[in-house]
Amino acid sequence: MTSYRRKQRIEKIARYVVLAIVVFITLFPLVIVLSSSFKNESELFDFPFKFIPAKPITDNFTRLKENFPLYIWNSVKLTFVIVIVQLFTAATGAYVFTKLHWKGRDFIFGLYIASMMIPMQAVMIPQFLIIRSINLYDTHMSLVLLGAFTAFGTFLIKQFFMSIPDTYCEAARIDGAKEWTIFSTLMLPMSKAVLVTQIIFSFRYFWNDFFTPLIYITTPQLKTLPLGMTDFVREQYVYWGPQMAAALISIVPVLLIFLFGQKYFVQGVASSGIKG
Amino acid sequence: MSHSLKRTGTILSFLLPSFIGFIIFVLLPMIMAFGLSFTNYSGGPNFRFIGMKNYVVAFTNPEFLKYLWVTFKFMTVTVVFQIGLGLAFALILARDFRGCSFFRGALYLPNILSSVAVGLAFMFIFEPTSGFMNQFLISVGLPTSKWLAGSKSALSVIITIAIWQNFGYYMVLFIGGLQNISMTLYEAAGIDGANKWKQFVHVTLPGLSPMLFYGVTIAVIRGFQVFDYIYIMTGGQQGGGPAGSTNVLAFDIYLNAFTYFRFGYASAESVVLMIIILAMTFLQSHGQKKWVSYDIV
C-alpha cells in the first residue's frame, strides 16, 4: 500500500513538473513581448534576459502614435460590424435550418457544412475578381461582405437551437406569433450562451485576421491592426521595440476576453467537434 | 395560395441573409476558380481558353513540385505533433485536479493570438545575430543557427511555431472527448482485470476516436493552407524563405495571383490544392470506418 502511495505521489510530482515546463514554453514568448515593449533598443538583446527592464521606457509606444491609433480604430470598427453581421446571418440561418420545415433544407445545410472543407485559397481569386468588379476593392465594405457568411457560426448556433424543443415554437405559433417574433423574443433569449460563444469566436477571428485585409486593403488609412503591424517587417532595418509594442497592443484585447470568458472558448472548440 | 406565398416569404427572409453570402462568396467563386484555371487570365480584358496548359505547366515545373513537397512536409509534421501533443496533454489534464484549469488555459492560450503577433515575437526570439535563442545556445556551449534566415532551418522553425500555437486547440478538443467517455466503462474494464494500458487501448482510444478523427481532419486541412507564418516570417510580398525553402503551395498561389497577376495559373494551383484537400478528407472519412467507433460512449 505504501509503495502504491509513493508511486502515486511521484506520478503527481512528475505531472506538475512536466506541466510547469510546458507552460513556461507556451508563455515565455508572451513574456518576451511584454518585457521588450518597454525596453530601450540597446537593452533589447541583452542576455541573460531580464524581465524587468533596467530603465523601462514608453518610447516604443509613442513611436506608434502616428499610424496605429487609426489602425486600431479600423480594427475595432470592422470587428464590431462583422461580429454583428455574422451573428445575424448565423442565427437566422440556424433558425431556418432547425425550426422551419421546407424542401431542400438538409441539402442546403449540407452544402454549408461541405464549404468548411474548401480551402480559402481555392476561392480567393474569384472572390477578389467579384469584389473588384463591384468596385469595392480597397474598401472596408469588401471585408464586411466577405465576412458575412459563416458556416461554422451557423453550425454552432444550429446545434444549440436543435436542443430547444419544437413545442415552444408550436405553442407560440398557436398563439398567433409570427416566426420573426418567435425567433427574436423566444429563441434568441434562450440561446445567450451560444450567442456569446459565437461573438467571441468571430471577434477573435476578425481581430486577428491578416489574410483578407492583406489582399483587399492597400490604402494606409484603411489598414487594420494586424496588417499595419507588418509595416515594420518590410523595411531594411527592423525596429524591434515598436514592433513588440504593436504586438502587445494587438494581444491585450483577446487576452482579456480569454481571461474572462475561457469557458466560452472551450465550449466553442468542443461543440465544433460534435457530430451533427 | 397567398398563405403559402407568405410562408415562402418567411422562410426566405430567414434563409437569404446567409444564403446570399454563400452563393456569391463561396459557391460562385468555386465554380469560377475551375473556369479560370483553363484560361490565361491576368486581370486585363484579353484572355483566352488554353485548356489544360496551366496544369501541365505546373506539374512539369520542378519548382511547383518542390512547393508541393514543402507543403506535404509542413502538413505531415504539424499534424503528427499537434495531434500527438494535444492527445498527451489532454490525457494529463482531462481529470480535474488542483490547478487543472490554469494549465488548460495556459496551454490553449497561444491558439487565440494573431499569427502576426506570434510571428513578430518569434522573429525577435530567433533573430539570427544576437537573438535570445542564439545567445542561449552560446551560453550553454552549443552551435548557433541562422534560424529563419537559413535555407535548411527556416521551415523547421516555422513548423515548431505552428505546433507551439496550435496543439492547445487539439488538447481542448480531446479533453471534451475524454470527458464524454462514461466512467462506468473504466470501472467495468477494471473489474474485468484490464490494466491501465489495456484500458487506454480498449476504452479511451475507441471512445475518443470520433474526436481524434475530427481533429486529424481539421489539422490536415489547416496544414495544407498554411500562409500567414510564411508571409510574415520569411519575406513578405516577394518571400518564400531563403532559397524558396518555405514556399508552400498556398503562398505560391498568393504570389502568382497578387504579385504577378497570373490569375489563370494561380487558379489552377488552387484547384490542385482543393482537390488534394478533398481527396485527403475523402480518404480519411473512408478509412475512419476501420478505426472510429461511434457506439462506445
Image (spheres, helix red, strand yellow):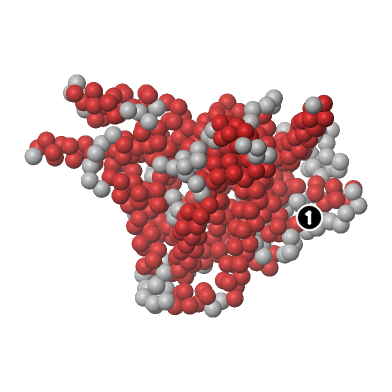
Residue shown at the point (34%, 43%) measured from the top left: B18
Residue B109 lies, with reference to residue B264, above or below; the image says above
Q: Looking at the picture, how far across and down is residue A236, in whole percent?
A: 70, 56
Residue corresponding to mark 1: B128
Tell me: residue A137, above or below residue A18: below
Q: Tell me which chain the residue with mark 1 is part of.
A: B
Say whether residue A146 is visible: yes
Image quarter where the N terminus of chain B lies is top left
Q: What residue is at 75 percent from the left and 47 percent from the top?
A: B125
Task: Specify the amino acid type for callout 1.
Answer: Pro
Which image quadrant for residue A15?
top right
* Image quadrant in which you'd find residue B157: bottom right
- Left or right: where A205 falls relative to B164: left
x then y, percent, for residue A24: 75, 37
Residue beneath the point at 29% across and 29% down: A166
Figure label count: 1
Q: In the visual, does A36 lie left or right of B167?
A: right
Is residue B259 visible to us here?
A: no
Q: Residue furthest front?
A: B192
Secondary structure beneath label 1 = loop
Q: Residue at x 28, y 24 (%)?
A: A168
